[in-house]
Amino acid sequence: MGKILTIAMPKGRIFEEAAGLLRQAGYQLPEEFDDSRKLIIDVPEENLRFILAKPMDVTTYVEHGVADAGIAGKDVMLEEERDVYEVLDLKISRCHLAVACLPHTGHSGVAPRVATKYPNVASSYFREQGEQVEMIKLNGSIELAPLIGLADRIVDIVSTGQTLRENGLVETEKICDITSRLIVNPVSYRMKDEVIDEMASRLSLIVEGDKTK
Ligand code: PRP
């Protein structure tokens, strides 16, 4: 029996693509993987244990070593700046971080209020732009903030653009592109380098093999 690898998987929209990628790479994942409410799923045949975490928390589990590896969005990595290795760009869950606001939002003269789930990324972006802003941290439904007068702008993920469109907001600046990454705890990487390298190379074959992505 080989070493068990514990992997933190992000629940929600990344999950399906990430699970699909692992299956394409040849990992036999049980059906319960997709629709169970379980938070820990063991796959002994593959020497894998999955923990299902909130996307924002994946880097925390991996940094603390309770998960050897994880799948995390670059947005989370930029925001959290955790001590983890990024070993592979999985090129899934493509989206971008952007600034958006209601059309014709003018300058009021005072520091604009920016609502976001990403206060660190947003702060450093506006600092680089030489603009002083007031940050308002929210945990979701960020697009609501300008609609009800809580903020002048938002910094958030844009994927299809549907949420912006349906709420009458316009993107004004793109901050950066985002994809999901395979991340690894540095100590785990020393102790379990063979299994981690094997997983990374199997995933890499799929990622690099599909040039349409
Ligand atoms: C994300 C993001 C946007 C939306 C963008 O929210 O924060 O609100 O998706 O996707 P779109 O461009 O395809 O419309 P999510 O659905 O993860 O929920 P949240 O608002 O609770 O963060």
Image (cartoon, grey):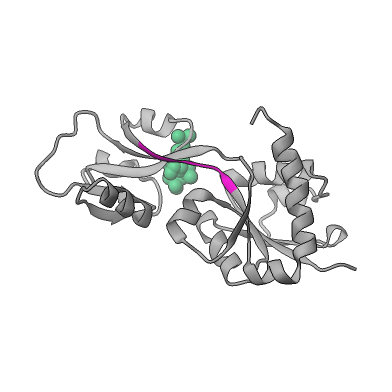
39 relative position to 195: left or right: left
Kindly give the residue lying farthest to the right in the view shown. Answer: 1
Instruction: Please tell me whether the stretch drawn in magenta is mainly helix, strand or loop.
Output: strand
177 relative position to 143: left or right: right
Identify which residue, 27 or 13, lies in the foreground.
Answer: 27
Rendered location of residue 50, percent (x, y): 71, 60
Task: Give the total number of marks visible in the rendering.
Answer: 0
Q: Would residue 213 be counted in the magenta stretch?
A: no
115 relative position to 118: left or right: left
Rendered location of residue 10, percent (x, y): 60, 53
Q: Would residue 176 be counted in the magenta stretch?
A: yes
Assign the N terminus to one quadrant of the image. bottom right
Name the residue located 71 percent from the left edge and 70 percent from the top edge. Answer: 190
Ligand 1 appears in which quadrant? top left
Instruction: Examine the image and state in which quarter residue 70 appears.
Output: bottom right
* Segment colored magenta: 174-180
Instruction: Examine the image and state in which quarter residue 102 appears.
Output: top left
Assign the C terminus to one quadrant of the image. top right
Kindly give the residue lying farthest to the left in the view shown. Answer: 109
| Residue 201 visible in the current orientation | yes
Rendered location of residue 27, percent (x, y): 81, 49
75 relative position to 197: left or right: left
Rendered location of residue 9, percent (x, y): 64, 55
| Residue 42 visible in the current orientation | no
